Amino acid sequence: MWLIMKLDGKLMLITGASRGIGRAIAIEAAKNGADVILNYVSDRSKPLVDETIKKIREMGRNAIAIQADVGNWEEVKRMKKIVDEFGKVCCLVNNAGITKDNLLIKMTKEEWDDVIRVNLSGAFYVTKIFIDHLIETKGSIIYVSSVVGQDGNIGQANYAASKAGLIGLTRALAMELARYGIRVNAIAPGFTETEMTAKIPEKVKEKIIARIPLRRFALPEEIAKAVIFLASDDASYITGVTMSISGGQRRE
Ligand code: NAP
């Protein structure tokens, strides 16, 4: 069988790659010939990341893991020093994200600040600190936004604002970085089967699914495949877009 390697020999850095969508992107990237840097933050995720690295190396690709909080400028700078020894990043996937849901009336300043710090400032810090690699490789950047950033959601003002912010960042940087040959795009996944959505009560889940034309949540692999496309030369004339991957919940 003839396998098409869309990212042959390229180095991809994925933030938040220990589980869920980030892990699926790492595996899909390796399947497509990329070497991978997997970022994560919590100690409990180390065994999971080690397992993914083993799997990627068995595919004949190289992979390393770096524990760093993307919302901490100094930790991202430390991550950069490690990556500098490993290679030049060609595809940057800003995927790390958290939720701290609450109605505005109850939402604390800490819940607001934490979500903006990790989801939005974190994506900016990583992009800013790795921009020299991307200029050198004429790379591509992908931000993982959400349908919630496009449509809003009750109880997620902090999360919706952070994800809408990523769409603005994508548009601004697509214009600004085109002169270096860097493409910048976002994806806006709908509800996807990961730990983030596992805590949704079954009754609420049923109501959400009733509003999704394809009548189910996405699998992380379905999100990952779109990321590989946008990162690859197949998307060489695509920049500044936000691609909805939402089973028809959102069509543009
Ligand atoms: P998940 O299963 O909760 O995984 C989140 C990942 O982010 C983990 O790898 C986690 O690392 C990492 N992370 C969290 N805080 C971090 C920090 N400060 N620094 C570095 N890494 C950090 O989430 P997911 O569902 O795969 O979501 C991935 C992305 O897709 C997020 O940006 C999310 O907002 C977005 N998204 C998800 C859905 C959905 O329905 N699941 C829909 C739309 C968009 P640790 O394991 O070390 O904590």
Image (cartoon, rainbow, N blue to C red):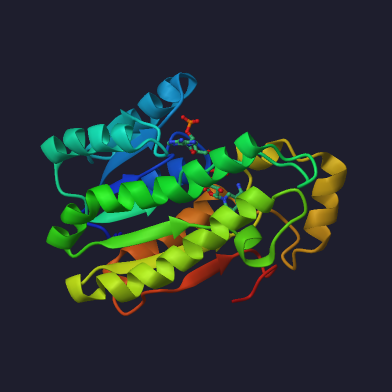
Q: Nearer the viewer, residue 236 or 175?
A: 175
Q: Position of residue 51 (x, y in %)?
A: 39, 26
Seen as rendered, the residue at the extreme bottom is 237
Location of residue 75 (image quadrant): top left
- Can you say whether 47 is above or below 198 in the image? above
- Can you say whether 102 is above or below 140 in the image? above
- The residue sitting at 28% across, 52% down in the picture is 128
Position of 56 with respect to 114 (left or right) is left
Position of 86 with respect to 210 (left or right) is left
Position of the C terminus by quadrant? bottom right
Is residue 31 at all visible to an observer of this figure? Answer: no
- Can you say whether 215 is above or below 205 in the image? below
Position of 13 with respect to 62 (left or right) is right
Q: Nearer the viewer, residue 221 or 245?
A: 245
Q: Nearer the viewer, residue 103 or 150?
A: 103
Location of residue 58 (image quadrant): top left
Q: Position of residue 116 (x, y in %)?
A: 53, 46
- The residue sitting at 70% across, 50% down in the picture is 156
Seen as rendered, the residue at the extreme right is 203
Is residue 45 at all visible to an observer of this figure? Answer: yes
- The residue sitting at 25% across, 37% down in the picture is 77
Q: Position of residue 150 (x, y in %)?
A: 62, 66
- The residue sitting at 18% across, 65% down in the picture is 138
Location of residue 196 (image quadrant): top right
Q: Nearer the viewer, residue 103 or 28?
A: 103
Q: Position of residue 63 (x, y in %)?
A: 26, 36
- Can you say whether 69 is above or below 172 in the image? above
Position of the N terminus by quadrant? bottom left
* Total count of labels: 0
